[in-house]
Amino acid sequence: MRHGLLLAAGLTMLLGACLEGAVEDGGGGGDDDSNNNTGSGAGSPTGAGPTDLPCDVAAVVGTCTSCHAVQPPVGGLSITSAADLAATSAVDPSMTVAERSLIRMKDGSMPPGAPLSADQIAVFETWISDGMPTGDCGAGGAPPVQIVCSSNSHWMGGDHESKDMHPGLACIDCHQNPPGGDEHGPGLVFAGTVYPTLHEPDDCNGLGGTVVVVTDSTGRTVQATARNTSGNFFIETEDAAPLVMPIRAEVRRGDKVLVMKDPVDSADCNSCHSTMGDENAPGRILAP
């Protein structure tokens, strides 16, 4: 599946310009709803954002650098890189700092005294929905991508039939036969693997317990639960009719949902959601 899922997980860093001399709630990590200040009421100038972001996103993040890219940063909250934007919120550990930030951008509480425009907010929200891709806006460039198997567990079974075989690889590339099966095992209507991070290697076991819901162009919906042992999810051809393209997908875990931005023409999810991502996908299918 290309174009990515709404990847909210790992994004809660506070974004927004601070007023000169802003007073933050100690322990709030710069995410204090009071927004007290001793300045004149004029917003701080926009600075340069982190260089490892797309340039339009870096421009939005640049509205916070006058407070959060200085030493010591206001409220103890430093925003100087994409990695900073992937930290967990100190105010609400159930959210990522960008999830929290987006809420405050939309309600006008950040930046204090100088709310962002609708266009600026849309840039940031679209960046999240596209999977928080890195960029190269500045001399520093994007940092090297770290490929890590989060589960520290790999499929070691070879090419024999198993519901947990080859997590991360394109499933339907082999499992495209009609119902009844052949040497490649049963045919699949849709399939893929869910992971806790974007860049995980092939055959690395993913994250179970999530539910992947696919809706085709007729409005028909099918869903599958990712297996706890591998993160693989799938529907066999004997259990459902073929999907009518294009399709949309979303990943659900509890009350959290990540939604694919654009419809796609393939139900072989891992063919696009590979280790580094293909066809504009940001990387792996990410759990919310």
Image: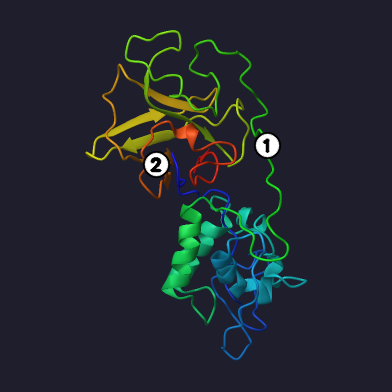
In the rendering, which numbered label is found on residue 108?
none
Badge 2 crowding class, 10 Å Cα cut-off, few under 14, some 14 to 19, many 20 or more, is many
Helix, strand, or loop for circle 2?
A: strand
Q: Nearer the viewer, residue 72 or 214?
A: 214
Residue 203 seen in this snapshot: yes
Helix, strand, or loop for circle 1?
A: loop
Q: Quadrant of the N terminus?
A: top left
Picture mark count: 2
Residue at which label 2 appears: 250
Res. 47 image quadrant: bottom right
Res. 33 image quadrant: bottom right
- Residue extending farthest to the left is 218
In screen coordinates, is 127 left or right of 240?
right
In screen coordinates, is 114 left or right of 140?
left
- Across and down, in percent, residue 242 comes to 28, 26
Residue at which label 1 appears: 148
Q: Nearer the viewer, residue 52 or 232?
A: 52
Instruction: Check the image and report above or below for 112 versus 288.
Output: below
Instruction: Check the image and report above or below for 17 versus 191.
Output: below
Marks 1 and 2 close (CB-CB < 8 Å) = no
- Residue extending farthest to the bottom is 40
Give the residue displayed 50% in from the left and 55% down from the top: 128
The answer for how far apart the CA atoms under marks 1 and 2 are is 24 Å
Residue type at mark 1? Val
